Image (cartoon, grey):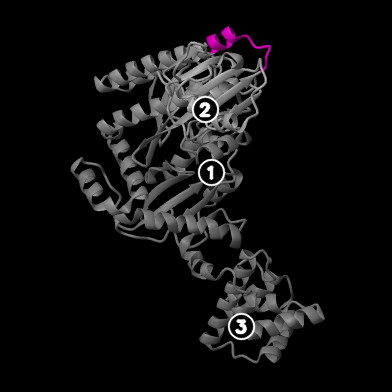
Amino acid sequence: MNVTFEQISRQFSKQALHIQWNKAITTAYSDTMLITKSLTHFAPEFIYVGYRSGLPDHAEGLEQASLMLINDTVEPASGQHQQIYSRQNRMEFGAGEDVFELYNQIRGLFLEEAEREQAKGRMLEACVAGKGLDAIVCAAAELMGNPVIIIDVSYKVLASSDCSGVSDPIWSDNLHKGYCSYDFIAAVHQLKSVQTGIESLEAYEVECSGSRVTKLVAKIRIGSKPVGNVIVLGDTRPIEQKDHELAGFTAGLVAAELAKNSFYRNSSQAEYEELIYELLENEENGPVLIQESLQSGVHLPKGRLSILVLELTGYEASASGKHTGYLRDQLHLHFGEERLIFYHEYMVGVSEGDTASSRSREYDPSLREFLVSHQLRLGISREFTDLTDCRKYYLQALKALEIGRIVWPAEPRVLYADVQLYDLLSPHAQHDSRDVTHPALTVLREFDEKHHADLYHTLYCYLKNNQQLQKTADELFVHRNTLRYRLRQIDELIQLDLRQIDQVLRLYMSYQMTDYLEKLNGGGSRASDI
């Protein structure tokens, strides 16, 4: 059994008057002893409890000893003593403390540590003996006195201890179904405790308004790759600090077990999900992974492909007023063939053919209504044919979401093909938009500001509508004669031949580039949304 000075400090932080921690002393303690005048040697593997007056005068090792002292006498002020004391691990307590009570408290820490080590040993034996995840989680639940659940990165339940007494209705439903609903996933990733904890390597606690039960989460990693989570439900007793270490230990054992069992997958659907996850994580091993999947008989998408990325951060399950499986049902309805998986904060799928990646922004109104009503956003990559390029096109779809929020904030579905120009401009984000503005457009803006006119916006709409008078007039809500008058003014000011395609191209591109850089730099836009 090994207890550190840091653990002891946490235990006695409110009780001690002063704590001095010499971080150069890294030895963990195997036991504790009472201080007596007969002591001749202070061993580094012990922490000593007693009265300051009881310290022996000439004991060996005192300069680097670990001490818990009751201040019953005034400490000598000589420089020699100060030099000795500065190198110790030292906790000081008030004169009214009972030395035997302190000793019993520290002994309790060692006994608890011994019990934990024994339980860890049982869990380790279960892992070595190949008894599987069920044996590990049952031992972990016995050790921590609370239900323990293992889920993978797709939020499927891989194993759990006896959870018949789970009072949390959401987790009770998850366990009954064997997976977590998309509504649950979306809600979880909006919790601040999850957003903070997910960046940490340590176990972290999660609390939410919908449940009185605190959850302790420890990430399961194989190498540097996250493959799931150990969830401890604080249902039977409150989560304690010591549970954090035990949850992390459990996650390590689970990772070893999963590594032995090829990610614990046994169905073609699960193998497909694992493949896409692996391709998104590391494209270098793509050819080998795909070959292995083909040999296993997994059906892989082929032909013209594109990556779909659905952002769930704005989704509110409670606001939908639907049943808990509603989001999953709706996503399967619209994207059933894409076989979406949960990856980081997104739902990600590989689309075959034209089903969801039409190049036009005119698309199924029911899909748009679904996305808008539930505050979801969809990014779609360009088409590709080699499945090993999944990560490259996943990043494209993410970029479509990022740029779409700037350029078309009201548009829930954005194709990378529509924003590629803006992506190319991103390295120049700090540039002044005037650097890319066509001189003719500068003239129009200056005229508008001086005369309170709208020629800059009028020319943009005219070019966008392929120089069709009626369509442009309708969009601007003006009469055709009003539009003709404005166009004559524009012609007199800029003196460019709009029958020449190269002139039109330069002007239209300048509109788009200026608009994007102004929005990117927080300056808004004086053109319409484009």
Disc 1 residue type? Leu
Residue 114 percent location from the top left of the image: 41, 14
Horizontal and vertical percent for residue 172?
Answer: 49, 20
Residue 62 placement, left or right of 19? left
The answer to whether residue 495 is above or below residue 479 is: below
State the residue position of label 2: 6
Q: Crowding at label 1, few (<14), some or many (≥20) Cα neighbours within 10 Å? A: many
Q: Which residue is mark 1?
A: 312
Between discs 3 and 1, the one toward the N terminus: 1
- Crowd around label 2: few <14 · some 14–19 · many ≥20 (10 Å): few
Closer to us: 177 or 127: 127
Residue 471 disc label: none
Q: Position of residue 291 (x, y in %)?
A: 21, 48
SS at circle 2: helix
The residue that label 3 is drawn on is 438
Mark 2 or mark 3, whichever is nearer to me: 2
Find the magenta span and give its range.
Answer: 94-105
What element does badge 1 sit on?
A: loop
